[in-house]
Amino acid sequence: MSEDITKKKLKIEAEPASFPNAYKFVVERQVYPAGAITFKKKEDADVAPLSRRLFALEGVTKVAIVGAAVTVSSDTAERWPQLAYAVGAGIRAVLEEHEDPATLWPEGVKGSGSGEDLERKKKVQELLDAEINPMIAHHNGMISLVDYDDDVAYVQMLGGCQGCGAADATLKMGVERMLKERVPEIREIVDVTNHAEGSNPYISAGK
């Protein structure tokens, strides 16, 4: 067999995002290792191969990349899940072609939505550090703020929270409600965790 046939495909997990008209794609390796980057216009997306490939798909209106997670928004919910196949294939094709981050993200690339509201980000971080993380630390868990952009907080669940069957309930019923009460400008909380890699959940799914 040729090398191309035997080569293992890059694993990508796709699921609906927590806000309308969007899907989250979690890749088994880092996509944007420098934190987070957001593209809201096709003209700005032309600067890098991955964002350019995704905005070439009909209906894509926003691409937000945080670590290993790529969140793609479309102009209507009716495009999903059909669009998900094209997005997943596009992510895989670009990442397999550009394994070197230097070619995937040319120097100086900056998404149109990457400017941060520093004051709100600071408030979210203070809440996580002072109130939320001390509570979930009893279960060997921790929540990290990866980025805050366009009033969307991107968080990563670590330790016992990663892969935990109760992670979604913890985020939705507790953390998200507290953050939105204290920082009302927050529109959405997006979990960018790759839960499939969790190795030490304190509650197993289905229990």
Image (cartoon, rainbow, N blue to C red):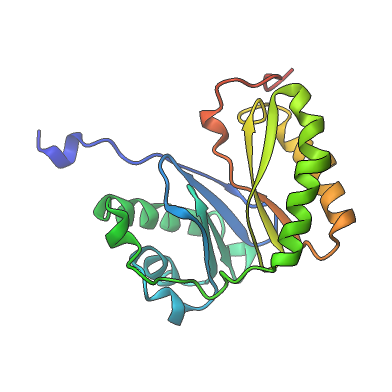
Q: Find residue 90 and report its image quarter.
A: bottom left
List x then y, in percent, for residue 103. 27, 61
Q: From the viewer's perspective, is 170 left or right of 202? A: right
Of all residues, the one furthest to the right in this rendering is 181
**Residue ID at (39%, 55%):** 91
Query: Residue at coordinates 44% horizontally, 55% vertically from top-left?
Result: 32
Q: Residue at x 77, y 30 (%)?
A: 136
Above or below residue 85? Residue 79 is: below
Q: Residue at x 86, y 62 (%)?
A: 184
Which of the image's four quarters has the N terminus? top left
Is 114 situated above or below 201?
below
Q: x%, y% of residue 175? A: 80, 43
Most distant residue in the left direction: 1
| Left or right: 101 as drawn, with respect to 24 | left
Left or right of residue 119: residue 46 = left
Q: Nearer the viewer, residue 171 or 93?
A: 171
Residue 163 lies, with reference to residue 96, above or below; the image says: above
